[in-house]
Image (cartoon, coloured by chain):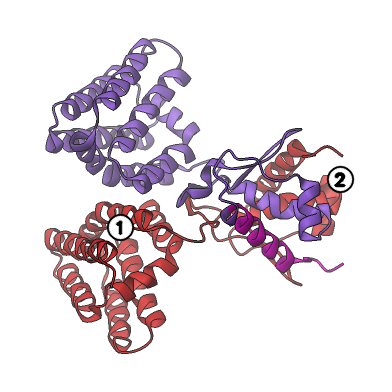
Chain colours: A purple, B red
């Protein structure tokens, strides 16, 4: 057997699986034929089929649930994905990531102020209430509530692609974001800055929502830059 | 054999491969041990190993070159990836994608005006010279030159994460971008708008680079919206 066999067969199978999903009109969550049926349909061995399935699983196009079957994945229609192989982020990358968020999130806060519906605003308020309850509690829960705030604000902007981009940026550095929370230890200031952003969005003041989101993220980045230069 | 076997083994192997790359200090392009060596090292069968390898290949963490071996992939350090499973984009998604580019690319043009080095500016000029030569030629070549212009401008902004985001957005809808070029048939206007952006970057005029990039992308989006509503 050569070092790397069947590259084109695995590629072709991946294409056929995607075609099966597309032409079958299958949507995220829909169940697909079993491994056995698929191997028969495509006339390939199970190991070969499984290579193609793992490729599709790795990129969120399908979900393989143990003992249950194969389903269309939630990410199949996304344009942009977080890299699932990132395991650690270096300080320089973390700062670049915050630099990227400083460019992208403020205009989204402005769009959120223009587009948010009443229910979305109530939901955002509840997220901050939740954060408020965790202010003296566990890092993980406060972190989750804070990330939910940023995700929800991006979603309210009403552009699915930008929503995916922000979701990807927040997903890929989850553990590091928590580290930020520990470094950036003025939890109350963080919370109050979020509240001020919500107020501007509720007031439909796009310019203020944008400038408050920018000031907030610049604050976070500045504190982290400072701490990285002079660790305690 | 159950419907979906070994999910945790494949997960664990993926982790061990990533750990091997990380702890070995391997960089993109470095050659990794052969399939045979890896199966021995991890004490797994070749088909099981190959499932893990295909997962890593699908997300650009490794490259499997037929007859040559396994190499660390260029994308392993990216934070954001284009979805490799996108095959077609609907009109609504295409417009959302342009909406996303309208938010992200103009501030990058401003940053490019502030940060671009002399060599980068010459390279950008050469990209436009190339586009100019293809103005009456093949769609594919003009399209490539135009996409190179947008990618190069994003890269000049000096933030690797934003660069990955723009690269992902331009990669994922490559064929559809070409379609845009056919719809948006005023090739000369497109070219002249690119030239005007370059001039502003060369003049280190961040505000003008930003507003020209925004006007350019809004132009493209407006023309496409119009054409989609009233196809010829």
First in sequence: mark 2 vs mark 1: 2
A152 up-or-down from B213: above or below? above
| Tag shown at residue A227 | none
| Left or right of residue A104, residue B168 in this image | right
Q: Which residue is mark 2?
A: B43
Q: Which range is magenta? A: A1-21
> What subunit carries mark 2?
B
Queried whether the magenta region covers residue A147, the answer comes back as: no
| Left or right of residue A179, residue B151 in this image | left
In the image, are marks 2 and 1 on the same chain?
yes
Q: Closer to the camera: disc 2 or disc 1?
A: 1
| Tag shown at residue B98 | 1
Which x, y percent locates residue B7? 74, 38
Queried whether the magenta region covers residue A20, the answer comes back as: yes
Residue located 61% across and 56% down the image: A18
| Left or right of residue B169, residue A216 in this image | left
What is the quadrant of residue B116 in the picture? bottom left
Residue B26 shows up from this direction: no
Question: Label 1: how many residues lie within 10 Å, few (<14), some (14-19) or many (20+)?
Answer: many
């Amino acid at each position: 057997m050569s070092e790397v066999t069947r590259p084109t067969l695995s590629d072709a199978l991946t294409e056929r699986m995607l075609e099966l999903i597309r032409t079958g009109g299958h949507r995220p969550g829909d169940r697909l034929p079993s491994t056995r049926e698929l191997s028969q349909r495509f006339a390939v061995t199970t190991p070969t089929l499984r290579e193609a399935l793992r490729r599709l699983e790795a990129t969120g196009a399908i979900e393989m649930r143990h003992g249950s079957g194969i389903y269309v994945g939630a990410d199949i229609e996304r344009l942009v994905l977080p890299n699932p192989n990132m395991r650690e982020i270096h300080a320089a990358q973390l700062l670049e990531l915050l630099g990227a968020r400083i460019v992208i999130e403020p205009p989204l806060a402005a769009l959120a102020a223009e587009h948010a519906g009443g229910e979305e605003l109530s939901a955002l308020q509840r997220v901050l209430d939740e954060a408020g309850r965790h202010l003296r509690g566990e890092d993980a829960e406060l972190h989750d509530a804070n990330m939910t705030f940023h995700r929800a604000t991006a979603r309210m902007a009403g552009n699915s692609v930008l929503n995916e981009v922000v979701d990807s940026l927040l997903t890929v550095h989850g553990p590091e974001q928590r580290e930020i929370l520990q470094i950036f230890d003025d939890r109350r200031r963080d919370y109050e800055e979020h509240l001020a952003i919500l107020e501007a969005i509720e007031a439909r003041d796009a310019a203020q929502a944008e400038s408050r989101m920018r000031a907030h993220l610049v604050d976070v980045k500045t504190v982290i830059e400072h701490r990285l230069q002079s660790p305690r």
